[in-house]
Image: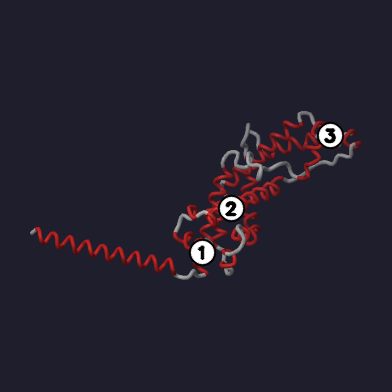
Amino acid sequence: MLKKSILLLSVLYFTSCAELQTVVNEYAIEQNKPLTSFDVSQGLKEALVIGSEQASKVLSAQDGFYKDELVKILLPPEAKSITKHIKMIPGGQDLVDKVVLRLNRAAEDAVAEATPIFVTAISEMTIQDAFGILKGDKNAATIYLKNKSYAKLKELFLPKVKNSLDKKLIANLSTTESWNLLTKSYNQVAQSFVGQLADLKTVNSQLDDYVTNKALDALFLKVAEEELQIRKDPMKRVSSILKRVFSEQD
């Protein structure tokens, strides 16, 4: 009985070893196979999905925009005269500070919904020049995505930004209402006798397009940062396709 048991265990052991060796051999063959355009395309798409998910996560957190000097949204360029003549507006600096905070809160709120838009755009990409992107600059995949999908992303993202601008995010006051309060106060000064003497121009900027562009630029900036990490750091390659594709650059 003991001999039979030992024999059975031996058969199972060597069978398992053989199966394990087969798996190892197959894995080695797979790893050594030349990369196809499809492999590279899938790897780049996965890198961009991961990058866009992480970018949305970072920027949608509270102060994701507001406390990041690289992406913090300030008043539109058309409103430069407001900050230049802020002392002429009663309580002007406080109004400006509140608008800036709300602009960034609206962007943080909007980008929380950006991931599905990015994923759809990425999944629809046809990367015919995949190897060129892989061997290109450190942000080549991000630039490719931006060039190919920016207009479509903006079209889809603009309503989300507008919704966030109209949402009462702070002190029961929306960003749009806060902006209108600021520009109304400034325009009253600009239209006054003193304002006309100073040649002040009224400000009537629309926020939705401005904030949409700023938010998308910030998202692509963060996606590029994630792409760079995946290219440089093997620990950031969290799947087999990422390991295979980007190990070609190591």
Mark 1: which secondary structure? Answer: loop
Residue appearing at x 66%, y 37% in the figure: 101
**Where does the image place residue 58, in percent across and percent down from the top left?**
56, 45
Q: Horizontal placement of 117 versus 182: left or right?
A: left
Q: So how many labels did they put on this image? A: 3
Mark 3: which secondary structure? Answer: helix
Q: Please name the amino acid that badge 3 sits on.
A: Val
> Looking at the image, which is closer to me, 120 or 177?
120
Residue hosting label 2: 223
What is the C-alpha distance between the residues marked 2 and 1?
21 Å
State which tag comes first along the sequence, 3 or 1: 3
Mark 2: which secondary structure? Answer: helix
Residue appearing at x 60%, y 42% in the figure: 64
Residue appearing at x 16%, y 62% in the figure: 8
Numbered disc in front, either 3 or 2: 2
Residue hosting label 3: 189
Tag 2: Cα neighbours inside 10 Å, few (<14), some, or many (≥20)?
many
